[in-house]
Amino acid sequence: MNQAEIDALRGRPVAPQGLFIAGAWTEPLSGGHLDVLSPIDGTVLTTIADAGPEDVDRAVRAARIAFKRGSWSRMAPAGRKKVLLKLADLIEAHALELAVLGVRDNGTEISMAYKAEPLSAAGTFRYYAEAIDKVYGEIAPTQADVLGLIHREPLGVVAAIVPWNFPMMIGAWKVAPALAAGNSVVLKPAEVASLTLLRLGELAAEAGLPEGVFNVVTGRGSVTGEALGLHMDVDAIAFTGSGGVGRRLLEYSARSNLKRVHLELGGKSPNIVFADAPDLDQAAKISAFGIFRNSGQVCVAGSRLLVQASVYDRFIERLVAVTRGMRVGDPLDLASDAGAVSSAEQLAKNLGHVRAAEEDGARLVTGGKRVREETGGYYMAPTIFDEVTPAMRLAREEVFGPVLAVSRFEDEAEAVRLANATVYGLASAVWTTNLATAHRMVRAVRAGVVHVNTYGGADITVPLGGFGQSGFGRDKSLHAFDKYTDLKTAWISLG
């Protein structure tokens, strides 16, 4: 990947998009479409279909027919493996095209998007493809005249609803294990970042997925997403997004067929720096990138920085220097460290959190404003507040933008208290050279992921999910199969 290759793709026309149902493109029955605004410059990039309940019903019906037909659900594991490996290869072959298209759609800087989106998605499909024929059933320890077998079976129709920050990466975390297990899938991308996942539908068909096994429907969450949540023939929903929507999906399950609902929700993740951190300069750099890359639009972002008092001033000085040195710019420029905020609405929310922090008495250290407004795009300066107390809104509410709340602590006990003073529990980090401190903190901090002397980078081999109001159910790793399979017991008398 080089700048010339990126620039050759940045202006490529994007045709108006339909719905991908039963292996073919189709227009929404409602006839409605939504404009796609590029956060790079605020211009209309293309349109996507605004699917209504009748369109969702078509997609679910196609998925159910495919599941019952058995061309995928009952295909030999080696056959499903072959198709998903081909899909991984196709994603990789189109990686730059997909990355540039995604950046034009959601504003992530290309240097991050290329690896985190298509290349990560390809790796995820490859991982679950390779796992298909390595997941075994069980034989129960029974008495001699009985044979107890435990089978894993696919659920049926799985709906996946994914956010706009990393649509391909997070989409693959859900779609790949669901397909690998033999399910049919209806995928609903976020309405502000659907383009790469619509392209994924085409690539899946090219790879050999039978028609109806993988469907992509676009539209507003309040309409398309609700229709999936209430549908009586969807067996499970896997969702990544806000707590408010997660609560509604649980309600929809109760109002419909008690479908399973797996939620990966928000976070207010603590990043804890002890005085004996191995390298304060490195910790400051990684901490800055852990909140400011992708303009803070990362579910596991280290949005609360807790620094031990004895090194507080030195660390903040280093952190501010790194932050002010970051280049916020055109996300299709390889020299940019951070790109655009995904939408005008999200930018307004971010700036609202800045105003609230100032009203609550936090001290603005750097940033706090919109930048590059002359481009027409949605850009925000990396923002640091210190003197943040647990009672302040900035310490409690997820911003999902480039805004960092900094607090100091005296000792380990206070660090644990501050870290756990949140309704969330998605991610965290601890910086220390003391092995005992590290292990105590891993146990004490209530979070699904605890990094030690780093922030981010956990790969597909380990689960991701949260405690508390960060949701339940795990993406990634072999544990993801638990969301998309059911257990069936065969109790056989041998007498």
Image: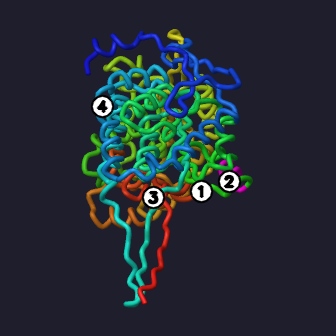
Horizontal side of residue 399 vs 324, given as left or right:
right
The x and y percentages for residue 139 are 37, 76
The x and y percentages for residue 29 are 68, 26
Secondary structure beneath dot 2 equals helix
The x and y percentages for residue 429 are 39, 52
Q: Are marks 3 and 4 in contact (CB under 8 Å)?
A: no
| Image: magenta residue range | 247-254
Tell which circle, 4 or 1, labels the residue nearer the N-terminal end: 4
Q: Could you classify mark 3 by the number of other residues whose Cα lies within 10 Å: few (under 14), some (14-19), or many (20 or more)?
A: many
Residues 149 and 36: in front is 149
Mark 4 residue type: Glu
Q: Disc 3 versus disc 2: distance between alpha carbons?
A: 38 Å
Location of mark 4 (residue): 92
Question: Where residue 434 is drawn, which disc sits there?
Answer: none
Mark 2 residue type: Ser
Location of mark 2 (residue): 253
Location of mark 3 (residue): 415
Q: Quadrant of residue 141?
A: bottom left
Q: Are marks 1 and 2 in contact (CB under 8 Å)?
A: yes
In this view, the residue farthest toward the right is 255
Q: Are marks 3 and 2 in contact (CB under 8 Å)?
A: no
In the image, is residue 336 above or below residue 154? above
